[in-house]
Image (tube, helix red, strand yellow):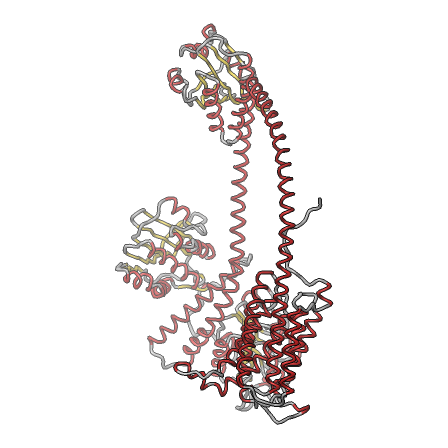
Amino acid sequence: MSQRSDAVSPPTASPEHSLRLNLSRSSVVVLSSFGLIALLLFMLGYRVYPFLHTILNTGVFLAAGVLALLLWDMGAGAGRPLLRPIAISLAVSSLFQFVHAIVEVEWFGVLEPIAHAEHWLRPATWPPAAYILPIGILCALWLRRGVLPPARLGLLLLVGGAALMPPFFLLPKYTEPIGLGVTRPTLLFVPLLWAVVAWACWRQRGADRLLPSLALMAAVLVGAHTAMVYSRETADTPAMAAHLVIVAAYLTLLFSLMRHAATDMLERSRAERELAQLNLILEQRVSERTAQLELANQSLQGQIAVRLRAERTLETQLSRLDLLNHITRAIGERLDLKSILQVVVRSLEDKLQIDFCCICLYDGHAEQLTVSCVGVHSAELALALAMGEQAVVGVDQNGLGRCVHGELVYEPDIALVAFPFAQRLAGGGLRALVVAPLLVESTVFGVLVTARRAEASFSGGDCEFLRQLSEHVALAAHQAQLHSALQQSFDELRRTQQIVLQQERLRALGQMASGIAHDINNAISPVALYTESLLETEPGLSARARAYLETIQRAIDDVAQTVARMREFYRQQEPQMRLAPVQLNLLVGQVLGLTRVRWQDMPQQSGVVIELATLLAPELPAVMGVESEIREALINLVFNAVDAMPEGGVLTLRTRVATLAGPDGKPAPRVCVEVADTGVGMDPDTRRRCLEPFFTTKGERGTGLGLAMVYGVAQRHKAEIEIDSWEGAGSVLRLLFAPVRVAEVAPAGAPAALAYALPPRLRLLVIDDDPVLLKSLRNILETDGHVVSTAHGGADGVAAFEAAQAGPTPFAAVVTDLGMPYVDGRQVAAAIKRCAPDTPVILLTGWGAQLIEDGDIPAHVDHVLSKPPKLRELRAALAGHDPRAAVQGEDHDDART
């Protein structure tokens, strides 16, 4: 019998439904009756039927509403996606027809405003209802694949209908007869839409069996709305005939739905009967299959009984093997030798009724055994025999001597054996003894000792079992040794991976540091320019203001030097330092000023007082170094000292000259600067590791890079660093520098001559994507008397230069940034040189020092300056311009964007 699916698929149109309408008698009667009535109205002549108009309006919106409900239920229940959008369209149209109908009622009381709104609701609601329904049906046909959900379609139709109300209210409802005698031109497109609906439904009639009926309704509505466009009053003969035909069309569709529902019920009844027959057949098959399974189950039960008997027999015969497997499995799950030996001893005591059991490890060089593991039940007896764990047993030519050479030793009665080890066990009441070697790769590394109080209590099977067990124990012990070696190798690999990971983190940090350095240089460049300009051009500054500006200038220089040293994270070569004489006493004062917030203001906010003591040696010799680096190292030492005094204390900065042994052993002077605190101090381990990178005792607050940076500064300056610390008493960190030789110090006299001639008044173009830096460069250069034009970005800069080059006043020089979006500094320089090869191009970039050190100066660039720029460097670069391009007049343009 062939299998049949019990799933009922949604009804679709058959070929018969696709080719003919299958009108019911009710539909034919309704269409004929209402058509004759409409014809009779035309035969009676032109009249007005107000009451009939009200009745037919009510019938129209009721019929549309009933159709909407029926189609929605059919679409939801039968899984026919086309019906629900059509139901939504009918519902929206019915809503507008309902509003059109209720305004004809003479309302009073709270509903009286409805009657007042009749003059505009009445003409404004019928046209939207007439247009919305065919439009909604067309949307349902074209979007039946679910592109537009029914709810969204209904909302769009409702909004569209509401949007049509004002235009139809303002347009004339009736007009004088126009072409073909039409008096209602606002409804002229309604029959055309219904004709399109009829064509579309008939063309797609194979998609759903409702579409032929819908095509018929649309065809009837074409005639109805054609008659409507010839009406001259609200309830005249053409309008009433149209209303009658509209009701007839809706009733025709309603009867078609009822006929479809009846057909569905018949098909469902037939399917239920077929399903009942299939269920009966299925029950018969289930009964047959159940009987077969019962027979198979009985046979299986018999086989199980036979197998159980065989298993019980096998269990009895191989009980020793089961014990061996149990121990082997237990020790196979462990990877440490001590645990393996404990499992073996305990299993033998519990399963084999051993009175004394222990395992000894063999030392071939010392010719002795060391007790490594003793059973729980044997512990008391082991103490009496002086064979507790870690006890040493000598090996001589007795049974132990034979065992350590790989032989299993069995003594049925050790009372008859005269060797010391046997006599020791016999003194504890033991009689039978088996000693099995633990042998791996022909090497004995231990022995298994088992004994019982009854003589000759070990059978041949017991001895064989112990021999096999010793082999398994030896393999497990060997595996544990291999695992230990592997674990050691893995730990070494993990340490190596951590080193590699740390290096990778440093590389990533270096890449990030490159971008951060560029951004910081851009940010501090305006501050550096304005500060240097104020110090140079404002002689009327007060001493206090000048001191503040000099402090700002030093801080900016320190930031610039710090940013330059960030390159050490991502560059392999050693940076070249420019050493100069440094006065440590002056540097200590600057450090105290820069760190005052940390050692004075912030502690006082928490009620903590840190006292400051400075002991500065007079006439302290200068040292050769980089002032910003030494200052930053001292700042880090001060910060560490403050962090070490959470409850307050004394912060001391001291300078002096000390005499230490030099590399050749002779006394040599050293300039010493010390930072001391009375804080918590360091323990020996912390003191030993404090200079390691990333080592910190501050938890998440610390980076572990502070003292490592100080150590790096000391190394670069060939200085020594000394650390004295006492737990609970504080620490002293000391930097020892070689004093500068007299020949290294420039003679004090007149200030050095300028290395450049001040440039003449020039016409300059400055290009950068940072508006703040652009403005500051413009202000500073204009202060020097130059005429400056600015461009925000490379593309604007090239355009401005080409425009000036074509005019009478070209630019004398171009100052451009390197890193800019779309058109960078390299492209700008190339474009400038193509247009004017003799025009100097000055590249101002945060990567300037790196480009110079790497010899990677871009082509077409005449000068490279680092950010933050120095006025003297910028002026020196501009001093090499072409004098012929100097500005002759006062007029200039601005290419700023």
**Along the line of sight, which residue is nearer the eye, 414 or 676?**
414
Q: How many marks?
A: 0
Q: Is 561 above or below relative to 29?
A: above
Q: Is 686 above or below relative to 563?
A: above
**Along the line of sight, which residue is nearer the eye, 2 or 740?**
2
* Residue 487 percent across, percent down from the top left: 52, 37
**Where's the C terminus, which quadrant?**
bottom right
* Residue 529 percent across, percent down from the top left: 46, 75
Q: Is 7 above or below relative to 546?
A: above
> Which residue ends up furthest to the top in the rendered image?
416
Q: Is 540 above or below relative to 508?
A: below
> Which residue ends up furthest to the bottom in the rendered image?
176
- Quadrant in the picture for residue 617: bottom left
Q: Is residue 443 visible?
A: no
Q: Is residue 464 visible?
A: yes
* Residue 369 percent across, percent down from the top left: 47, 19
**Along the line of sight, which residue is nearer the eye, 58 or 166?**
58
* Residue 298 percent across, percent down from the top left: 60, 28
Which residue is at 65% across, 87% downward?
A: 43
Which residue is at 36% across, 65% downward?
A: 594
For residue 1, side relative to residue 306 (left or right): right
**Where's the N terminus, which quadrant?**
top right
**Along the line of sight, which residue is nearer the eye, 512 or 557?**
512
For residue 309, side relative to residue 743 (left or right): right
